Image: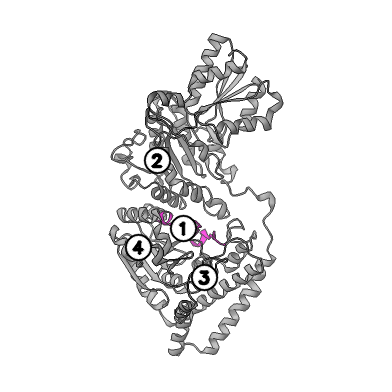
Amino acid sequence: MANIMYWEAIQRAHDEEMARDPLVICMGEDIGVAGGTYKATKGLYEKYGPLRVMDTPISEGGFTGLGIGASFLGVRPVIEIMSVNFAWLAMDQMFNSAAKVRYMSGGQLTAPCVFRSAGGAAHQLGAQHSARMEKVFMGIAGLRVVTPSNPKQAYGLLKSAIRCDDPVFINEHELMYNMKGEVPDGEYFHPLEGSDVARAGTDVTLFGYNVSVHWCLKAAEILDKQYGISAEVVDLYSLSPLDRAGIKASVSKTHRAVIAEEDEAPVGVGSEVIAIINEECFFELDAAPVRVHSALVPQPYNHTLEKAAIPDHEDVVKAVLKLFGKA
Amino acid sequence: MKIEDKKRVLREMVLHRRFEERCYQAYIERKIGGFLHLYPGQEACCNGVMEAARPGHDYVITGYRDHVHAIKCGADPKEVMAELYGKETGSSKGRGGSMHIFDAAHHFMGGYALVGGPFPLAAGIAKAIQLKGGDEIAICFLGDAANNQGVFHETLNMAALWKLPVLFVCENNLYGIGTSIERSTAVVHQHKRVAAYNIPADECDGQDIDIVYEHARKAVDHVRAGNGPFFLELMTYRYRGHSMSDSRGYRSREEEEVWKQRDPILMLRDRLITAGALTMAEFETLEKETDAYIENEVVKFSEESPEPRVEDLEKYVFAERETQLPWLTGKAA
């Protein structure tokens, strides 16, 4: 096991896959000569050259479509969209071309491409650079959506996404690139479907994904030490498809559920998970499920307002205490 | 083009014309649903360019007015019509419809319904050719109105920057849906717009197949020789409306008549008759044979083909699950 950073894990996955298959390429803004805004492609330009590590113009719709077109002929592009906020400009191609081409061609064409993008609120980046957009992607037929919460997942999910014939959107997080964690020394493929139990517990399930997994883990620690509540943390690294069986199994055991998301609530991961709970195990519930989520505002610049808009582990603790009638 | 080739192309163009007219009839009979964008009037564009290229070898992509391009690449007219009928035997197994004809085996990479959407896809196909080192080229057929999309400019920039083997063919039919080009576009002559990207461009009459062929040959040769992209504008006209609900109230019948005087099929026919290579009787026979083929084979096949099974509704959303299990479950061999 190597203890490496999230960005290093992503870089390693790129490097291994590019070394293995000459048709794996990567493209995006500043990924080559500059080494990548978050260093996720560091050193690849020098190793694989400009034909396979493409510094693109700032034309998200154009270069995303270009990568998708190349994938029709078996090229496997890893397309980095520097910030998920810019993905709005690429969505026509991602949704109308990549996600639909297999279906509308009756299985003749596939788009085996990977879209990677940094989402989430970082530090005072303001309204147009702080979006969480996973809920937009997870409702699109034909597109897989995964979101790594640690370096091991970041490495293994990218490896699997490159190998998979379906288009995959990988939602990363601006604040997680320097997080350290254990990654297997040998080749490792994280499943693109399912969920991970990040901490076992018996009294309540805390559902998180990406950054909110860490709020849940911290909250579980506090709940255990200070309140004697045993919380299970389920990491929903696959947002499309969501892990129906995993959600059902955990809630059937704990009978209570809290869903923590950095995104705003409407039409989000929380509402989807609650719908699944209702469909799969409604009569197992001892209390109504609760969502912890951002305020429905364009992200404010002011530090205090920003902090107020985004939830954290304390909000998760409060939500659980409320469920147990302790707040 | 040699005389034999011209005679063959005339036969193909008659098929393309009659096929589209038969689609119109089937639509009126409600055998075909959705939107239907027909090609009559523009036949010399697709045929002239593809005669200069290698159908079935070069990769072709286009918008929603795509039936003829697919057939020219090698798609079976029966399967194209069956697709319009929504049948399991259709080009896209009834999942695509008129705007989404595909024939990957003949390198016809599809019809797309977002105006301008194929631009970057075409450049991507060219990028793949470049990476793999093949001698194919990518050919992107789109209308003039697509050039007002942002991806037009984004794609031209990247295609020039990376010297991608892609030929952009602009079939300038003077209307974007129901708005004339003068009312939507500051520059009517589209080839002038690509000068900003240092891409060589050419414009010619899109009604005369001999002229289209000569210009297309230079364009195709330029791209195939590894000189990067080329932009070819063909001045043409669609006889019918944009789609089926279009009564053409935005243009005069006189204007339509002027264009019909230069019909691409009749011009080629008359040229062959003048050259002594065809008689009017032979042409009339050709039309009858074409209609008989369409009726007795193409339409019959479409009518008699089975519908897709409802059980297969979700088939083709993702790749076959069994083939992807190592990545879906993480249990790689």
Q: CA distance from mark 2 to mark 4?
A: 35 Å
Mark 1 residue crowding within 10 angstroms, few (<14) / some (14–19) / many (20+): some
- In this figure, which residue is indicated by the disc labeled 4? B186
Examine the structure image and report whether residue A148 is included in the region drawn in magenta: no
- In this figure, which residue is indicated by the disc labeled 3? B249
What's the residue at 49%, 21% (across, down)? Answer: A215
B174 versus A295 height, above or below: below
Q: Position of residue B14 (x, y in %)?
A: 53, 77
Label 4 close to label 1 by CB (< 8 Å):
no
Q: Position of residue B151 (x, y in %)?
A: 39, 53
Marks counted in the figure total: 4
Looking at numbered disc 1 in the image, what kind of residue is underneath it?
A: Val
Indicate which disc residue A80 carries. 2
Q: Of discs 1 and 2, which sits in the foreground?
A: 1
> A66 or B22, which lies in front?
B22
The chain that hosts pointer 1 is B
> B2 or A203, which lies in front?
A203
Q: Position of residue B96 (x, y in %)?
A: 58, 57
Quarter holding the C terminus of chain A is top right
Q: Specify which label sits upstream in the sequence, 1 or 3.
A: 1
Q: Of discs 4 and 3, which sits in the foreground?
A: 3
Mark 2 residue crowding within 10 angstroms, few (<14) / some (14–19) / many (20+): many
Q: Would residue B260 be found to the left or right of residue B164 on screen?
A: right
Q: CA distance from mark 1 to mark 3?
A: 22 Å
Range drawn in magenta: B98-122
Q: Position of residue A130 (x, y in %)?
A: 41, 33
Indicate which disc residue B115 carries. 1
